[in-house]
Amino acid sequence: MCALPGLPGPRAPPQPLLLLCLLAAGCPSSADDHPPASPFTSLPAREEMLARYSNLSLESHNLSLTEYSNVAVEKNITLQRPSNVELTCQYTTSGDLNSVNVTWRKDDELIENNYLINATGNILYTQYMFTIIDSKQMGSYSCFFQEEKEQRGTFNFKVPELHGKNKPVITYVGDSTVFICKCQECVPLNWTWYSMNGSVQVPLDVQMSDKYVISGTNANETRLKIMHLSEEDQGAYWCHAIFQLGESEDHIELVVLTYLVPLKPFLAIAAEVVLLVAIILLCEVYTKKKKNRPDDGKEFDQIEQLKSDDSNGIENNVPRYRKNESVSQ
C-alpha cells in the first residue's frame, strides 16, 4: 500500500524517518505525466481476490463526508447474487489530514488491514474491497474518520424486498381470492407460502389440500389462490423467497366476512328509526291525554253539582210532608 508520509493507515505504528522517505519516494505522484486512474495501489490480497473471483460482477459504491456532517451518511445496496464489492469513502476536512484516524467495521467487528488510504489536497480517501459469496458477508460496512468529531459512512447490503399488497384483502364466505407476491428485477431460487397459526408460520401444502393453488406466470412472482373461503381462513399469509445471499418475505392480510356483515349498518339504522317513531308516538299519546284532562274535570264538577241539587230538593220536600201530616190530624 502507498500512503502519504505521516498519514494514518490500516497499520499505524510509527515509522522511522528514513522508511517514510522511501515510502514517499516509491509512491506515484499525481503530478506525473501519467497519473493513475485510481488514488489507490492494490494490495496483494485484493489482487488475489480479483483473480479468484474474476467471473463475478463488480459492485462499486462510494460515499462523501465532511467534517461538518451532523448525521451518519448511509447507502442501501441490494444484492441477489455473489459479487465483488468495492467501497470508497471520501472525507473532506480543513484540518490536518495526518491527524485523521481511519478505520472500517463490518457491523460491530473491526476490519484489519485489508483497506487502502490515500489523500489528494484536503480530501482523504479510503477504499475497502471484498467479495460477497453468501449470507455471512451481508450486513453493514462502515468507514470511520476520527478527528475532533467522528464521522461515519455506512453501506447496508441486503437481499431484494418482496412486494405484496399493503391493504388487507376483504372478501366473503364461500368466495375465492388470489394473492400476488412479486420481486422487481430479481429471480428468487425458490418461493414458499405460509399461513399464521398463532405466532407460528405453517407451510401451505397444496398437494394435501384442494383448497390452495400456488402458481406463477413469471419467475419473479408467485400467486396463491384460496378457494371456498370460510371465517377460519382469515389472517396473515406470508410469501417467502430464497436467494443465493439470503431470504426475504412479505405478508398479506385476509379478512373474510359473512353476507350479514354489510346488512348490520342498515339494521342498526332501521332499529334507530323504529325507536324514534315509537318515541314520537308515545309523546303524541301523552300530549292528547294531557289535553283531555280539563274536560274530565268539568264533567266531574257537573256531576257533583247535580248531586248537590238533588239533595237540596229532597231536604225541601221533607218538612212540607210533615206539615201536611200535622194538618190532617
Image (cartoon, helix red, strand yellow):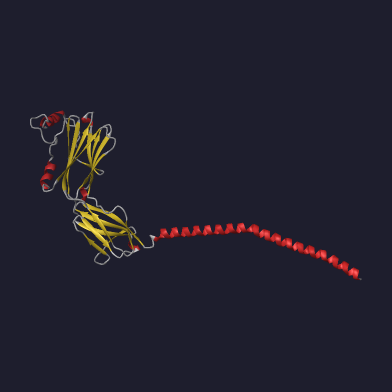
Percent across and percent down for residue 309 are 76, 62
Percent across and percent down for residue 106 are 23, 44
Q: Quadrant of residue 266?
A: bottom left
Q: Name the residue located 88 percent from the left edge and 68 percent from the top edge.
A: 324
Task: Name the residue at the bottom extreme.
Answer: 329
Image label count: 0
Q: Name the residue located 48 percent from the left edge and 60 percent from the top edge.
A: 274
Comparing 156 with 130, the one in front is 156
User: In which quadrant will I find the C terminus?
Assistant: bottom right
Q: Quadrant of residue 214?
A: bottom left
Q: Quadrant of residue 258?
A: bottom left
**26 left or right, relative to 328:** left
User: In which quadrant will I find the N terminus?
Assistant: top left
Note whether 165 is above or below 68 in the view shown.
Answer: below
Task: Name the residue at the right extreme.
Answer: 329
Q: Name the residue located 51 percent from the left edge and 60 percent from the top edge.
A: 278
Percent across and percent down for residue 262 are 38, 60
Note whether 143 is above or below 328 in the view shown.
Answer: above
**78 left or right, relative to 309:** left
Percent across and percent down for residue 193 are 26, 59
Comparing 329 with 168, the one in front is 329
**100 left or right, relative to 34:** right
Comparing 203 with 284, the one in front is 284
